[in-house]
Image (spheres, rainbow, N blue to C red):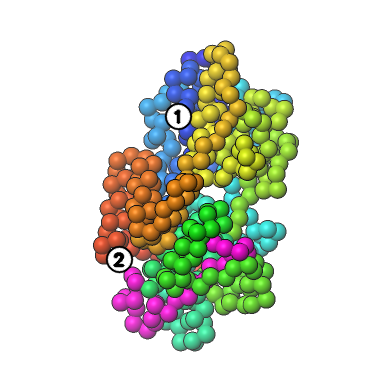
Amino acid sequence: MSDHHVVVVGGGFGGLQLVNGLKDAGVRITLVDRRNHHLFQPLLYQVATTILSTSEIAWPIRRLYADRPDVTVLLGEVTGVDSGAKTVSLRNGMTLSYDTLVLATGATHAYFGHDEWEPVAPGLKTLEDATTIRRRVLLAFERAEMESDPAVRDALLTFTIVGAGPTGVELAGIIAELAHFTLPKEFRNIDTRKTRVVLVEAGPRVLPTFAEELSAYAQKALEKLGVEIHLGKPVTECTADGVKIGETFVASRTIVWAAGVTASPAAQWLGVTADRAGRVVVEKDLSAPGLPEVFVVGDTASVMREDGKPVPGIAPAAKQQAGYVAKVIRARISGKPAPAPFRYWHQGSLATIGKSAAIIDFGRIKLKGWLAWWIWGLAHIYFLIGTRSRFSVAWSWLWIYLSGQHSARLITQRETMREEG
């Protein structure tokens, strides 16, 4: 093994793909992440909506690389990068030196200048976010069951999702199904079928990155589930009592934010140019401007396609970028010519609407409905890590499909009725 030290920050899709791509490359690798697990984010909303448990979509990073002596895993939070000294600083005071640095630090929620909304309108990026949303959804029904004031009860039974991208659409569909089909027989004082699920989108249509025909199908499918869709007006206020859509106030005690993201502070660490979302505007080989030994991939990077459109912030894109960077690093170490500039291959966009409908956009080929839902499910099961997770998720979906019962409807935190009251 050579002395070349590669530091990878972030254990998401990009970070893991990079580490996997450098197997047997003869380098030392240090992988740093704030959490000890890799998270399969595309199914995170299913934890938030009681379909899956946390262990079904997350795996300990150390376990993944237990048989890779070239990989050292550190649980830590990066606070800065000194590109001149080639060092990375961690919050605990530790400093790591690097020969090559790869930043795959992802993104977090963007509240468009209203960060004060976050406590009442949590986003969905981590397991903690998912369990928080799950707890709030379930507690809303529990509180409504004991509430005597009709106005308060109605507010408790109104769930608002801000943002109609894939996450917002998927959340809205599952919450509507939970309220209208799973829970009605379990409560005595309330009729959960009267639950309102409100989906708000500032743009003109839901799923704006999909073809218009698929967007229209998704909207009809959501409306069939009873979801109220508000288009063309942004949310102008979020409080513990509800949201204001334009000038209209909607009393709602549970709000979920799915309207936008902002990148990690990687651009600030490096002192390089960033786009409006804070992403590093990278070179054609995905290195940071003026820093050929530093690469940025995934949601932290601003990468343009040949047609001038940005590469989407999705898992396949992060994996393609990381795989490419691994090839660049291998070429440099071996003294071989660098590969051609990075080119993104779009493998399609997918989104689900409830338990038996989905849309898939492969470009020329577009699918919707039941067949698309099965393809969506098979694709996600295939990309899960390990046979146990694939079997567990497949069984959970089959059980819900046949019985209509969600298996993860547990309020597990110590704080229950006392919290957020």
Closer to us: 59 or 193: 193
Extreme-top residue of the structure: 335
**Residue 223 magenta-drawn?**
no
Residue interval drawn in magenta: 181-207
Q: Is mark 1 on a helix, strand or loop?
A: helix
Q: Compared with residue 308, is residue 175 higher up or lower down, i.e. above or below?
A: below
Which residue shows up at 45% across the image and 42% down it? 37
Task: Name the spot of residue 9 as percent of width and height, x first.
Answer: 56, 35
Q: Quadrant of residue 414?
A: bottom left
Closer to us: 345 or 249: 345
Q: Compared with residue 36, is residue 167 higher up or lower down, i.e. above or below?
A: below
Which residue shows up at 29% across the image and 61% down it? 401
Badge 2 is on which residue?
404
Contact between labelled residues 1 and 2, with CB atoms less than 8 Å apart = no
Which residue shows up at 42% across the image and 35% down it? 62
Amino acid tagged 2: Gly
Task: Name the spot of residue 349 as percent of width and height, x first.
Answer: 48, 48
Task: Name the spot of residue 267 as percent of width and height, x first.
Answer: 69, 39
Badge 1 is on which residue?
20
Task: Name the spot of residue 120 as percent of width and height, x first.
Answer: 58, 66
